[in-house]
Image (spheres, rainbow, N blue to C red):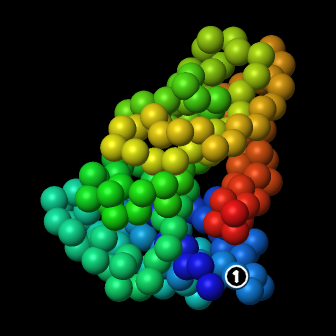
Amino acid sequence: MKRIAILASGSGSNAEKIINYFENSESIQVDLLLTNNPQAGIIERGRRLGVPILIFDKKSFAKTDKIVEILQKQGIDWVILAGFLWLIPTNLVKAYPNKIINIHPALLPKYGGKGMWGHFVHEAVHANKDTESGITIHYVNENYDEGEVIFQAKCELIESDTPDDIAAKVQVLEHKHFPEVIEKLILA
């Protein structure tokens, strides 16, 4: 059995899709949810879905080995970022080489980097009058959104799309593809 930990900072809709996708899997299970945000929606989702939750602060995440030690003690094989906003520290990247993946709500390398998340991405896509957007699933390294691309999916945009419309189209792609790509990677 391969064990997944999910890091999330927000509502947790992608995390919930991943948990539900693997609910009856005989080879992959979500064992732990971690968040840096004590108000995050992922906490309530985790409680409802029966997945243990760990809330942590910046110091324990970035300046100590506490999180790495917890993940290793729990037997975590893969770390999935699903709307997690902090830079992943080097000690975690080294502890899980090519075993940490992220989903980004744009077609990287466009609209990546620090501060480019959620509505900020969709507003930038809208402001540039792009005719397409999408998702990028990529390995995580020590820099924001610069790890090797694993998978991309696109959606067509029309001139009348608002940033909220773009967000809705991108979220459909996230929910459809992220669990499947995780499964293919882990079982490869």
Q: What residue is rendered at 35% in x and 73% in y?
A: 55
Looking at the image, residue 160 sits to the left or right of residue 54; the answer is right
Element carrying mark 1: loop
Looking at the image, residue 36 sits to the left or right of residue 102; the answer is left
**Which quarter of the figure has residue 49?**
bottom right
Q: What residue is rendered at 70% in x and 82% in y?
A: 27
x then y, percent, for residue 24: 77, 85
**Which quarter of the figure has residue 25?**
bottom right
Give the residue at mark 1.
Answer: 27
Where the N terminus falls, by quadrant?
Answer: bottom right
**Which quarter of the figure has residue 54?**
bottom left
Looking at the image, residue 24 sits to the left or right of residue 103; the answer is right
Tell me if residue 175 can be seen: no
Most foreground residue, 6 or 25: 25
Where the C terminus falls, by quadrant?
Answer: bottom right
x then y, percent, for residue 28: 66, 78
Most foreground residue, 57 or 91: 91
